Amino acid sequence: MFNSFQYVHPNGEDLPFEKWMKFGIELAQFLKMQPEPVKLYISVPSSLLFSYIFTLGCIDYDFRHPIKERLLEKYLLLKPGQRILYKVDDEWIAHSVEEIGEHPISKKRAIVLRDRLKSINYVPEERWATHISIFDEEITDIRNVRKVNNVFNILEDEFLNAIYEEEKLQLVMMQNTPNTYVYTNKTEWNAYKETLKLRYLEQEILLDNFFFDGSLTTFRNIGFLEHKVTENLPIDATIILNGSSRGIRKLDLLKDQKCVLIIDRHELKAKVEELQFKIENDCLMGKSKVINKNLIEYLKEHNTYIPEGVEIIVWIP
């Protein structure tokens, strides 16, 4: 997909993606498509810069491969008191969920919405994917309906519409739940991400044209993990951990998720060795299976190779 893109060099020149950029994107796609909770360890010159490219590959995959059945699961798992956005004409109205029930006339499955005045709406299943967007995972008391103004309709985004299929954008927008999470220093990560600029045709593209964390609009396709939060992650989510210390703390807690550990070559040697020892020891004791050859075969099929000097381990717990 990124064959039509260039990156903007710091001197202002538009250049083709470098080999390590193509590798980072393909590595992300490889991890995303795995049916098991595969883990990647990779040591690179700059973990921050590489994490941007890897995350870009993950988000691109999420845009191109939404799972319709997963969206249906999200609807069926809605809890009483959870907030959703319901499309009324051209406006998005926040409602509270009463239950997953049935329509009183058709007797078919419906999402039942209620407000504090006990007004009820029944939304039939055939309208869910076009009129209901997941808004908030938090469970609260039934609240009044209210118009939400900062809804980002990605179907109206010219850039996203130019590179992704409309039907897939619709599914991603309605699911409105990240399937890619970054465990990093969020302040630092956000502060420097504009250093990576891309060019698509004549348009300058920033990572924020792909990444939406819900801070400015209601739409979310990327999440940031906090120190103590690893629960309630989607089972097929991909977790990007920046730094050996985070890997040491969270690797065992994320055994059911696909993860990449991006290690900076300039990190403290003791921490890196501690993480490497843990990985290698689990493999030697039979707790994990190394599958580097699977990655090498995939990269060859996609005319991509591991850059010189990059250390990488791929395994399944």
Image: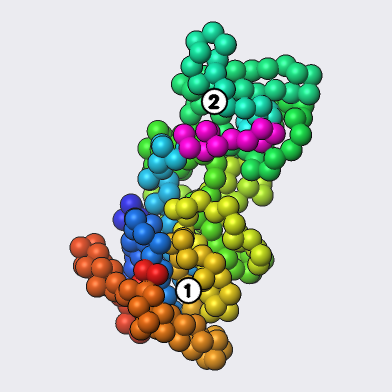
Task: In this rendered view, identify the residue nearer to me: 172 or 114.
Answer: 114
Residue 131 is labelled as 2
Image coordinates of residue 53 in percent, x first then y, are: 45, 64
Give, as a single range, the part of the protein colored magenta.
72-82
Is 299 left, or right, of 153 in this rendering? left
Residue at the image point whose x is 46% and y is 21% from the top: 126
Quarter of the image with the C terminus in it: bottom left
In this rendering, does residue 262 appear at all? yes
Q: Secondary structure at mark 2?
A: helix
Distance from the alpha carbon under mark 1 to that under mark 2:
39 Å
In this rendering, does residue 154 appear at all? no
Is 211 left, or right, of 1 in this rendering? right
Q: Look at the image and say whether residue 80 sits in the magenta stretch.
A: yes
Q: Secondary structure at mark 1?
A: strand
Residue 304 is labelled as none
Residue at the far right: name it: 117
Q: How many marks?
A: 2
Image coordinates of residue 253 in percent, x first then y, are: 54, 67
In this rendering, the answer to whether 271 lies above or below 76 is below
Question: Amino acid under label 1?
Answer: Ile
In this figure, which residue is indicated by the disc labeled 1?
262
Q: Look at the image and say whether residue 317 sits in the magenta stretch.
A: no
Residue at the image point whose x is 48% and y is 29% from the top: 129
Residue at the image point whose x is 51% and y is 71% from the top: 251
Task: In this rendered view, identify the residue nearer to me: 99 or 168.
Answer: 99
* Other-residue count near label 1 (Cα within 10 Å), few / some / many at <14 / 14–19 / ≥20: many
